[in-house]
Amino acid sequence: MKPAPFDDARPADWPAAPALLAAGARPVAGGQSLGPMLNLRVATPEKLADLRHLPGYAGVTRRGGAIRIGAGTTHAAIEDGAVPGRLGAILAGVAWRIAYRPVRNRGTIGGSLAHADPAADWVAVLPCFHGEAAVLGPAGERRVALDRFVTGMLATALAPEELLLAVELPVLPEATR
């Protein structure tokens, strides 16, 4: 099948992204979850908001005792060692088991988590680390504990005008197993 017609938009900056969502746009970066839903017409948004170009949406940084993984970071980047230390080794072991390489090249950690498919690897694994999701909405950034982020099958703590910015996980001691 082919998706229903839709428009696309590229928010100029982070503050513009929640405004697009509030106007009914659906966020997209890798599209590995949304793409098939569009093709099957399970999802028929009038507009998609392309987030891939926004600064900090992909990538990994360390802030004190936490590792911040941008929501647009691909499974392949995690598999290939973008996350440092013992945490990175554990996450790489999860990432290489996700689908196959072409999917991992485009699919993102944020898209997987925000889609909240109960069969998804990140949905099951990330709450074990007692980290937080950084969420952006019209009122600014807020934090949601990862064990409270997914609220049900295909349901999250995100409001319609909010998007997932990043996942923040604690740095793990090297002896962690």
Image (tube, grey):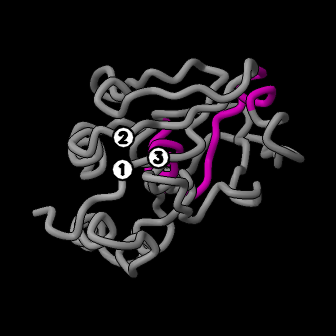
Circle nearer the viewer, 2 or 3: 2
- Residue at (27, 69) in percent of width and height: 86
Distance between the Cα atoms at labels 2 and 3? 7 Å
| Residue stretch in magenta | 18-41
Q: Which residue position is annotated with label 1? A: 170
Q: Which residue position is annotated with label 3? A: 167
The image quadrant that residue 46 belongs to is top right
Q: Position of residue 116 (x, y in %)?
A: 35, 36
40 within the magenta span? yes
Circle nearer the viewer, 3 or 1: 1
Left or right: where does residue 89 sit relative to residue 34? left
Circle nearer the viewer, 1 or 2: 1
Relative vertical location of residue 132 with respect to residue 88 in this rendering, above or below: above
Q: Are marks 3 and 1 in contact (CB under 8 Å)?
A: no
Q: Are marks 2 and 3 in contact (CB under 8 Å)?
A: yes
Residue 29 visible at all: yes
- Which of 9 and 54 lies nearest the eye of the viewer? 54
Q: Which mark is residue 131?
A: 2
Crowd band around label 2 with a 10 angstrom C-alpha radius: few (<14), some (14–19), many (20+): many
Q: Position of residue 61 (x, y in %)?
A: 56, 62
Relative vertical location of residue 177 with respect to residue 65 in this rendering, above or below: below
- Type of the residue with mark 3: Val
- Type of the residue with mark 1: Pro
Of the residues under marks 1 and 2, which one precedes in the sequence? Answer: 2
